[in-house]
Image (tube, rainbow, N blue to C red):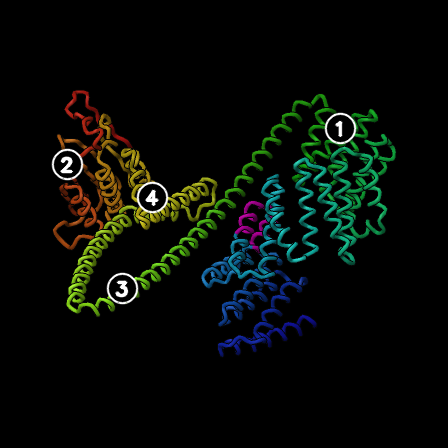
Amino acid sequence: MKIGYFTIVLILLVGCAKNTAENGVPSSQETEAITQLIRSARDSTNLPLEERKQFLQKAEEITFSLPNDSLLLTSLSDISLAYRDLPDSTDFRKTNKQVMFMSQETGLYTTLGNSHWDLATFFKNNGVLDSAFFHYQKALNSFELLPVDPTSRSLKAKMLYSMGKIQDSYKDYLGAEISITEALRIFTDLKDTKRIYNCYNVLGIIASGMGNSDKSLEYFQKARSYVEDMEGMDRIKYTEQTQNNIAHEFLKKEDYGRAKVAFGELLQNKDIYTRNPELYSLSLSSRAYSLYKDENDLEKSKKLLEQAIKINDSIDYSFDQPRAKQYYAEILADEGDTAKAIAYAQESHDLAKQTYNNDRLLEVLRLLTKLDGNNAMAYSNEYFDLNETIKAEERTKRDKFARIRMETDEIKQENVVLTRQSQIWAGVSVLTVILLLGGYIISVQKISNDRLKSEEKQQKLNQKVYDLMLQQQGKFQEGKQLEQKRISEELHDGVLGEMLGIRLILSSLNNKDDEGSVQKRSDFLERLQHVEEDIRTISHELNDAAYKKFHNFILSVEALLSETEDSSMAKCSLTYNNKVNWDRLWMEIKINVIRIIQESLKNSTTHGHSENIKVAFDLQGDKLKVTIADDGIGFDVNKGKKGIGLKNIASRVEKINGTLAVDSTKDKGTTIVVTIPCKYEEAEAAAAPNTDDEDFEQEVINA
């Protein structure tokens, strides 16, 4: 009855919301209807999943009718979270992706950051920690674009804290320490006591992992000092947590006497078993082992461990059960009951495997190697294999985290450099205006004074200045046109071809998630950085950097052909005389030949749809003959006007005093022949090759 009444109310709310949406004005009725539908989906746990999803689907309908982008994205983000909590991972990922895309398009960085945060939490809950780290970093990048205020700073610190915990789990202690310390600095400024405590607590865990017990205890004590400012259950909870961490550190550094006392104090806390049975069981196991190691009190230790094992079974606390059984096996072995000790150790081994508790599994394997002589070799090999696997995985994850942070830092640095350059140019512009204005004022004053002296002299001077300005303006326009033409050719022949190839490859890899495809995408992202360098080089007229790229002529051509093969279905080959030192060619010839080949390859693959492309270099006396032939669809060279690609090729041939011949027939391919007078670097001109040698060889390379 209650559910029926509740459904009627929702229908009325939805109806009112739709009427308001038709008027194009968001109202409290719409937002209230969306909120109510989301709450219904979450709270109606007695309903089937499909019916709960229907509430969210209705909420989506109302949400997409909202005219306000900010309100729409906030509501859609809440719906996405509700899907995640149902749980319905498919609809969560779908709505989360919508929020990301729309937030990016509209520049709403709060919802963009929150969507990455939600996805990171989803991956973390499902054990995909590297993807979780990636999206925490993305969320951090978004929050850093917000205006600086306590809210945005708190969001950034929360992301850093989450990233640090993931780094610690993969033993990237240095990276974790950097992330947590940065988060701590922000939380300290904001006076967020609970999160300051959390940061110091994690720093203690990190220091413990690095083997620095003294520093670890120092951090735990610092964390304890912030517990005193808390109230209620938080104070009790964090006090017990800190006491356990301190006691565990004593146990880890084999200070069994202090560990025994610390765990004893923790167990004396009133109602600890009721509040936190997992912590109670963990403390029982640890105190039992401390007593065993400090006092060799086998009976008392066994009783405490038996109690802990029983509690773990009753509350299904399987994560710590392997440790308790391992301790029990050690005591049994000390008593001389080896068979029973091996049995408990094997149970610990199996449980550790089931719970993916690799650190405990390594400890148990060491124990089994000592206890079970018959199977010692097998346990030893398993220990070695597991240890190597863990190290390799941790190393891979650490490298991935470092790469993510490095790429982010590079982007930030580039932004800083661009901002600084903009500021410099703005300063130079202002200074130039001031200088020009000052010069103008001085000139006007001087002209005014000269006018008093001689009107005729002033007229002659004005005429000279005018003539000089016209001459200077003509030279400036001529230089500007030449530079524009050069930059146009560089962008079209070099950068555009490179980006086209990368785009085609990335398109083919877009729907692949295997490791090889991920690596290839990473490689081509690095190549995009090289394209950025080319653009920056062209923009700043740093011609030397571009020249250096073609120092090894043949390797540059081979790389170009290889990139073309990767980005298309065409097979490319290069034929050349391997006795010729091609690097001695005049630099201007090498650059223009490579650009001509690059433009021809682009035309062959993009317009000609060629399957085979052959490039050949041939020295004929003092002439270099370059031939590019393909088996594409061809074109009629006598019809239509030339495209910009052929115009650029012709322009480059003219620059180096060469001749160009284009032969193409429909469906029979295209052949481009460029003949160039050979020029060599001045110091090495005497070493020009002799192509009439009887031992002359042609080397053919499939790119």
Question: Mark 1: which amino acid?
Answer: Ile
Q: Residue at x 67, y 57 (%)?
A: 191
Residue 304 in picture, x, y percent from top left: 84, 38
Residue at left 59%, top 57%?
153
Residue at image mark 1: 342
Image position of 260 (left or right of 220): right
Residue 508 picture location, percent across and down: 38, 46
Residue count near mark 1 (Cα–Cα under 10 Å), binned few <14, some 14–19, many ≥20: many
Task: Say if residue 241 shows up in the picture.
Answer: yes
Give the number of the disc on residue 443.
Answer: 3
Q: Secondary structure under badge 1? A: helix
| Callout 4 secondary element | helix
| Magenta segment | 117-137
| Residue at left offset 42%, top offset 41% | 523
Residue under label 4, please give it.
567
Q: Looking at the picture, which amino acid does disc 2 mark?
A: Pro
